Amino acid sequence: MSRTVPEWQGASDDADIPARVKLRIWERCGGRCGLTGRKIMPGDARDYDHITPLWLGGRHAESNLHVVLKDAHKEKTKAEATVRAKINRVRAKHLGIYPPSRAKIQSRGFDKSRNHKVSNGALSRRERLVRDV
């Protein structure tokens, strides 16, 4: 079956989705959340989400959008942000532009000697006590 209406594609990545396109997406999804599968009721807050995120090369087009519940969309965005941050850190380190760590390496230090001699050659208090016994 061929399409009678050409597919909508946004002029830019942040272009508003027209109401006629939102209606077509709603009908294609059957009024169900694309993430949870739950039926979206009239009072439920909803969003239109990209199936393949734009930062992974997804298009801002009708075929790459689905209707989702706002709460589910927040969770998906949070999970994607974590992954995106990790990818950006690894890529920056690979390119050598990630700032080096400023944390100093913690050392255990040196052990304190039991028979510590004073720098002028005199015996320590402990050595004097041991010698006098």
Image (cartoon, rainbow, N blue to C red):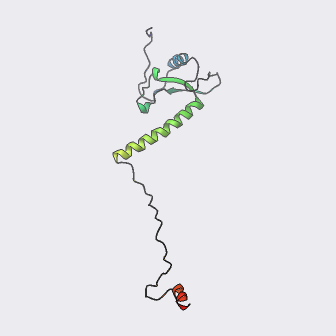
Image position of 35 with respect to 2: above or below: below
Task: Determine which quarter of the picture holds residue 47.
Answer: top right
Image position of 76 with respect to 105: above or below: above
Q: Position of residue 120 (x, y in %)?
A: 43, 88
Q: Quadrant of the C terminus?
A: bottom right
Q: Residue 3 versus residue 117: which sits nearer the camera?
A: 117
Task: Answer left or right for 5 relative to 132.
Answer: left
Q: Residue 47 versus residue 73: which sits nearer the camera?
A: 73
Q: Quadrant of the N terminus?
A: top left
Residue appearing at x 58%, y 21% in the figure: 32
Task: Answer left or right for 95 relative to 83.
Answer: left
Image position of 51 with respect to 115: above or below: above
Image position of 86 with respect to 16: above or below: below
Residue appearing at x 46%, y 62% in the figure: 106
Q: Position of residue 92 (x, y in %)?
A: 38, 45
Residue appearing at x 60%, y 32% in the figure: 71
Q: Residue furthest top?
A: 1
Label tally: 0
Q: Residue furthest left?
A: 95
Q: Position of residue 9 (x, y in %)?
A: 43, 21
Q: Residue furthest front?
A: 133
Q: Position of residue 97 (x, y in %)?
A: 36, 48
Task: Determine which quarter of the picture holds residue 5.
Answer: top left
Q: Residue furthest bottom?
A: 132
